[in-house]
Amino acid sequence: MELFELGICEAREGLAKGEFSAEDLVRSVANRVREKNGEIGAYVTFDEEAALALAKENPKGVPIAVKDLINVKGQPCTCGSKILQGYTSPYDATVISNMKKAGFIPAGRVNMDEFAMGSSTENSALLTTRNPYDTGRVPGGSSGGSAAAVGGDLSIAALGTDTGGSIRQPASFCNCVGVKPSYGRVSRYGVTAFASSLDQVGPMAKCVDDAAVLLSALAGRDPSDGTTPDIPVPDYLKCLEGASLKGVKIGLPKEYSSVEGLDPEVKRITAEAVKRCEDAGAEIVEVSLPHSGYAMAVYYIIAPAEASANLARFDGVRYGHRSKEAKDVYSLYVKSRAEGFGPEVKRRIIMGTYVLSSGYYDAYYSRAQKVRTLIRRDFDAAFSKVDAILTPCAPTPAFRLGEVQDPLTMYLNDLFTIPSSLAGVCAASVPAGFTADGKLPVGVQFICGAFAEEKLLSICKAFENLTGKGRDLAGKARR
Amino acid sequence: MDNTILEEAVKIDVGYVAELARLELTDDEKALFQSQLDGIVGYVEKISEVDVDGVEPMMHGHALVNVFREDEVRPSMDREAALANAPARTGDEFLLPKIVEGAES
């Protein structure tokens, strides 16, 4: 096995035994990136020198690919946008300083949909990222670079961010474990904001153990982010010892039993996952999320509204692109933003500005926040009965590049991931199988209550023990 | 205004809203976004079916209130670092086209 194929725990074992050093790991990943990134397009940039310098300081460190909207001092941070080309981060995000303290090395910047808006990474203004299992297909999004890097063994693990499914859906498309922590579990300081009441950073990894180790490093109270409560962070890896599904109550939302447009292969793989849990002693219970049918509508009001406010900072004044055509301050704003932002970002800024504008605020934004309360209550009621909810992660396996053109159709990719994002609870995608032709990976989603990451990861681990890691499932599909 | 329901299908005025958002759009963009956003606005209008009488809005990811910290001076980013990404600067300041009529630019 080559070093770049290792996961975090495997790499740490080798480092501890002195079989190789952090520099060896970085070099192996860098060589792999040189060889494969032209085909996969996972990375926007890979600064080998910077990673090697950190590896020298931290000889037991493990390199982690970083989604290109998380600030790492001295590195670019494009957010997949032309508006931030040439920008260099003046500081480390809290997740980066936490990660460094825990023995990780930020190594390489991975591609994404512009400002995390998208489900295929096709909205990146910089390059095309391809699915490592079929380069004619998308890696998912918005953390598509992270998923393609992990799934294609161009990294040991990666950081992604998830606002409405941006960790989980690409994890499902690229055969990774992807965890969206509970809202507030991980600091957002230094992470370019998309929708501040929804955004969370989380691990994307080759197995559940690796995701647990990385999450332990990321999570916790941060004085620079007032939305991170002072709830102790357990050693999530330790929580996985003896993981079992015996007696675990798993809820299946009845509203999802007849979803339109659900791919038959996804349906089959999800049903098999349910059966596997049941055979392992889990109790399968029907639950109801009566407002889940409104979640998409609520999300496409709240997320653009918050985005329109957050993206107001890109005005060509202090950093980022400034139009050369600007004659006065007004034209500097409107032209810099017109030249810098891509179409999906413009669409969402307009949508968000509209729902916040005078006369429409109550009908859209305020009302959406109330329906969000009802969605949260649905989950509270479900979690009074069950330990976890099991759903498909995405309605289809990875689709073809260019296949989905209509924005609203693209939004439907997040059908199963958005409700839990709105509720602020934790959720994860875990590899569950491959399509019948053996080509495309498909994940399932487990959802647990707010700050119940221990339970979530333990259930994912027990499921992985039954199903096999992504690597085992891939078999011949593995490139 | 607790149960505001839009009586009729509202058409979003993309040109006007883009101006509010400080975005210059080409005519092609305007036409494309108009049809796409009509569809998206039409879709999200389904939330008007939900009875939200007496329901409190959920403003954030969870219900944290009164997050306080000591009011103490902490080191912040130094001026050079803050100015390093400036598209244009003069000395220790960001440089902009003139804002006030008649002022020196």
Image (spheres, rainbow, N blue to C red):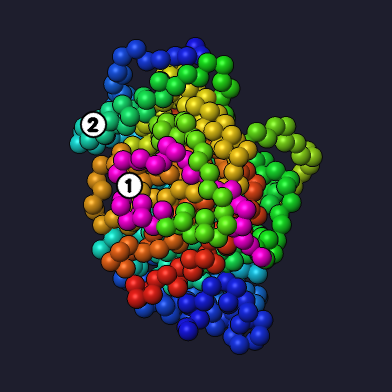
Work out whether residue A433 or residue B28 is closer to the camera in this orientation and state it: A433
Q: Say which residue label 1 marks.
A: A262
Q: Is residue A302 above or below residue A50?
A: above
Q: Is residue A109 magenta?
A: no
Work out whether residue A130 or residue A245 is closer to the camera in this orientation and state it: A245
Q: Is residue A300 above or below residue A67?
A: above
Disc 1 and disc 2: Cα gap in Å? 27 Å
Q: Quadrant of residue A92?
A: bottom right
Q: Is residue A330 visible?
A: no
- Determine the chain carrying the residue at label 2: B
Residue A22 pos. (x, y %): 59, 79
Three-letter code, disc 1: Leu
- Taking the spot 36% from the left edge, 78% from the top edge, the residue there is A35
Q: Say which residue label 2 marks.
A: B35
Residue B20 pos. (x, y %): 39, 26
Tell me the element at label 2: helix
Which residue of the protein is positioned furthest toward the bottom in this rendering? A19
For this view, does A249 lie left or right of residue A314?
Answer: right
| Numbered circle sitting on residue A152 | none
- Taking the spot 48% from the left edge, 84% from the top edge, the residue there is A1
Q: Is residue A56 above or below residue A304?
A: below
Tell me the element at label 1: loop
Check if mark 1's residue and mark 2's residue have beta carbons within 8 Å. no
Q: Callout 2: 10 Å neighbours few (<14), some, many (20+)? A: few
Work out whether residue A301 or residue A211 is closer to the camera in this orientation and state it: A211
Badge count: 2
Range of magenta residues = A242-271
- Specify the quadrant that holds the C terminus of chain B: top left
